[in-house]
């Protein structure tokens, strides 16, 4: 059996508390004992609300921030303890796309220069060959040559995101980590970018780790989805299962809260708000808001159980309650 | 009977260094007392500028009224003095905004800010300011009305101690302080998580029903309109292109832009329906396209659309479209 492209085992990130000048801050566990695997050419969605740790997870997996515990394997190589120099050749193969393309682009570089920069730094092309390669990359993401010499302020949000994608593709990565790539875009532009992402993955066999709070977008892009709540995965499985027939009460609440075009009115599906990660509730993190919680849910953190069909679920109650 | 709010041929321009942007280009809208109207459209369509016009919050200059009227209970607010406008704000028309954190003073307790707002409104309508204690009691009553637990303790809290959803509830409570008849909500749930958004939308729906409030809700999210508004107006590049009952518009949009907008929304329950983008991008409002402003992106545009601006006309009862090619 082939190994996954990216694997995390027991991944944890704790931001230590500080004894500051005015007050002490408590330690925050942003990501806790997280296991996941992403196959070559696959797309895994990470969903959850603000503060659930999904963006921290992205930065951990790319080794952009130090991890507190766990192991990360990229293409069968343990990268957990690699130093910057050893990481550098791997960085070409894993690229990050941010939410806000305006902040990700240098305002003084044209689209052409922005995409050429990584190729130039890595010494992969010069002169005519470089220009041709950049033009081909921009065409691939749907930006015609007329846009080559435009600066970011002369581009729309969607066009800027296309430049960011072209720049990420320049070094021919195997993995794209996309952190809310369409959240800053209008819906008519979002649909265009989703088409670009689909086409790229089909053509280049890229793997996507796709982070989003928008469940409908994740459903379009990903085959598998992991739902995070307060730093932990609570449910993981195929997109059709997790978003079509959710089993965890939190996933159900999320899906139930999305306003639908077909229905008038919206019924709140969960009371309250996600708890403060600095003072998590006892036992299961979701139990204070959970409609099916029992006293046992307060006693200990339920394990993330792997079910027969490969679905992972952190809720023994859901398994008792539903058929 | 006159409508609560009537916007007639309202044109607003912004004078910029690059030229004059025709930001609102002939808006006609009506809202009855107790009615709920969603204004939906993408970035730059003018929906927030329109909302701010109702409270006279657009800075003038650079903004400039080119023509039209905004009649509230029959009188034109565009001609009102600052003093008359102050009487209206809060007492008759109230507004809540997208980012609750930036509308609260981080240094003051919630109670202090609410008391100031309540007493400020007393002054604005020329009444004697009620004492702080009375204002505080009123504040606690308002916090309870928006479903916040332990109002008394909350009054002593500072904004950073509250979650995003609680802050937005506090601002809604403040908006209710003067018993307004019209609530203008500009993307009130956009900064909130989806489970909290559902709670705040349910709260707004309850307040509208209980208090007979009229609601104008500005949003980019058609799902939010479906959840909270009986009627909806779709805006594009400073014009209203379609206005209809929400259920009618969402199930069968007639204007090509409204059709495109709905087709672009990914459907969680029907993933097999691929969202379709709209080719091209929004036009410059300094040099807008001649004729119909949507024609450069429109799949059904003809020569007439390039030269003649379509006027919005009622093609079905309660349903109007600004398109030369619209058929019922």
Image (tube, rainbow, N blue to C red):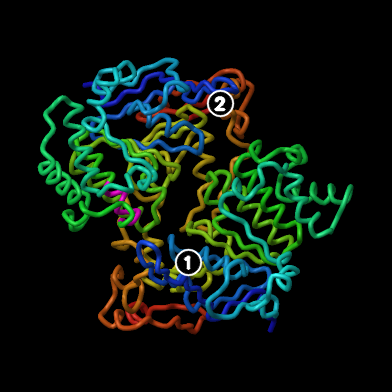
- Secondary structure of the magenta portion, mostly? helix
Query: Relative to residue B327, is residue A78 depicted above or below?
Result: below
Q: Residue B209, position in %: x, y? A: 21, 43
* Same chain shared by disc 1 and disc 2: no
Q: What residue appears at the point 35 percent right and 64 percent down from the top-left corner?
A: A23
Q: Which residue is nearer to you in this view: A46 or B52? A: B52
Task: Tell me if residue A73 can be seen.
Answer: no
Residue A293 lies left or right of residue B257; in this view the side is left
Task: Tell me if residue B130 can be seen.
Answer: yes
Q: Residue A142, position in %: x, y? A: 71, 46
Report in which chain the residue with disc 2 lies: B
Query: Residue B289: within the magenta?
Result: no
Which residue has dot 1 on it? Answer: A53
Q: What residue appears at the point 20 percent right and 32 percent down from the top-left corner?
A: B121
Q: Residue A251, position in %: x, y? A: 41, 67
Local SS, label 2: loop
Query: Relative to residue A144, is residue A216 depicted above or below?
Result: below
Q: Residue B310, position in %: x, y? A: 51, 21
Q: What residue appears at the point 38 percent right and 70 percent down from the top-left corner?
A: A26
Q: Please tell me the numbered disc located at residue A323.
A: none
The residues tagged by marks 1 and 2 sit, at their Cα atoms, a distance apart of 40 Å
Q: Which residue is nearer to you in this view: B317 or A316? A: A316
Which residue has dot 2 on it? Answer: B285
Quarter of the image for the C terminus of chain B: give it.
Answer: top left
- Labels 1 and 2 touching (C-beta < 8 A): no
Report in which chain the residue with disc 1 lies: A
- In the image, the segment drawn in magenta is B162-170
Q: Residues within 10 Å of mark 1 (few under 14, many from 20)?
A: many
Local SS, label 1: loop
């Amino acid at each position: 059996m082939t190994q996954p492209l990216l694997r995390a085992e027991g991944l944890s990130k704790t931001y230590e508390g500080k004894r500051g000048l005015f007050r002490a801050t408590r330690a925050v566990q942003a990501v806790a004992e997280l296991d996941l695997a992403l196959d070559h050419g696959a797309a895994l969605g990470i969903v959850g609300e603000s503060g659930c740790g999904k963006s921290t997870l992205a930065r951990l997996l790319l080794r952009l921030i130090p991890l507190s515990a766990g192991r990360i394997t990229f293409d069968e190589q343990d990268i957990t303890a690699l130093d910057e120099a050893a990481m550098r050749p791997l960085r070409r193969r894993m690229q990050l796309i941010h939410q806000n393309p305006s902040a990700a682009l240098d305002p003084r570089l044209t689209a052409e220069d922005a995409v050429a920069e990584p190729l130039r730094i890595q010494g992969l092309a010069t002169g005519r060959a470089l220009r041709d390669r950049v033009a081909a990359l921009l065409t691939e993401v749907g930006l015609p040559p007329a846009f080559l010499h435009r600066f970011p302020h002369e581009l729309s949000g969607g066009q800027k995101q296309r430049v960011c994608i072209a720049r990420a593709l320049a070094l021919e990565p195997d993995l794209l980590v996309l952190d809310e790539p369409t959240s800053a875009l209008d819906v008519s532009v979002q649909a265009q970018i989703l088409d670009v992402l689909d086409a790229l993955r089909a053509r280049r066999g890229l793997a996507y780790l796709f982070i989003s709070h928008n469940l409908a977008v994740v459903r379009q892009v990903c085959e598998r989805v992991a739902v995070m709540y307060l730093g932990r995965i609570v449910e993981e499985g195929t997109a059709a299962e997790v978003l079509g027939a959710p089993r965890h009460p939190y996933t159900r609440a999320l899906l139930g809260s999305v306003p639908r075009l077909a229905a008038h009115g919206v019924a709140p599906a969960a009371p309250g708000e996600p708890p403060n990660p600095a003072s998590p509730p006892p036992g299961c993190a979701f139990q204070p808001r959970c409609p099916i919680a029992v006293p046992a849910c307060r006693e200990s953190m339920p394990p993330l159980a792997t079910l027969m069909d490969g679905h992972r679920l952190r809720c023994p109650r859901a398994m008792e309650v539903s058929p | 009977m006159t409508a609560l709010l009537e916007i007639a041929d309202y044109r607003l321009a912004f004078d910029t260094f690059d030229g004059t942007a025709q930001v609102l280009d002939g808006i006609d809208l009506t809202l009855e007392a107790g009615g709920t109207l969603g204004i939906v459209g993408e970035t730059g369509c003018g929906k927030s500028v329109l909302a701010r016009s109702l409270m006279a919050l657009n800075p003038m200059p650079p903004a400039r009224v080119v023509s039209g009227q905004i009649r509230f209970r029959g009188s034109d607010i565009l001609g009102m003095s600052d003093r008359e406008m102050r009487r209206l704000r809060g007492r008759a028309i109230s507004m809540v905004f997208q980012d609750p954190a930036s509308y609260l003073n981080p240094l003051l307790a919630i109670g202090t800010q609410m008391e100031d707002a309540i007493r400020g409104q007393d002054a604005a309508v020329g009444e004697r300011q009620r004492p702080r204690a009375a204002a505080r009691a009123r504040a606690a009553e308002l916090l309870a009305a928006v479903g916040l637990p332990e109002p008394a303790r909350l009054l002593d809290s500072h904004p950073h101690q509250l979650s995003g959803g609680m802050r937005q509830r506090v601002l809604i409570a403040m908006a209710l302080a003067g018993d307004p008849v019209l609530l203008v909500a500009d993307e009130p749930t956009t900064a909130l998580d989806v489970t909290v958004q559902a709670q705040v939308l349910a709260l707004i729906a309850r307040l509208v029903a209980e208090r007979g409030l009229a609601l104008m809700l500005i949003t980019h999210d058609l799902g939010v309109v479906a959840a909270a508004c009986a009627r909806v107006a779709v805006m594009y590049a400073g014009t209203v292109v379609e206005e209809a009952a929400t259920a009618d518009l969402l199930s069968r949009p007639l204007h090509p832009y409204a059709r495109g907008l709905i087709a672009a929304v990914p459907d969680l329950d029907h993933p097999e329906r691929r969202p379709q983008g709209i080719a091209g991008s929004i036009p410059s409002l300094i040099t807008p396209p001649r004729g119909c402003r949507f024609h450069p992106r429109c799949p059904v545009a003809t020569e007439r659309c390039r030269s003649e601006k379509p006027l919005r006309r009622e093609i079905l009862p309660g349903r109007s479209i600004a398109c030369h090619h619209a058929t019922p």
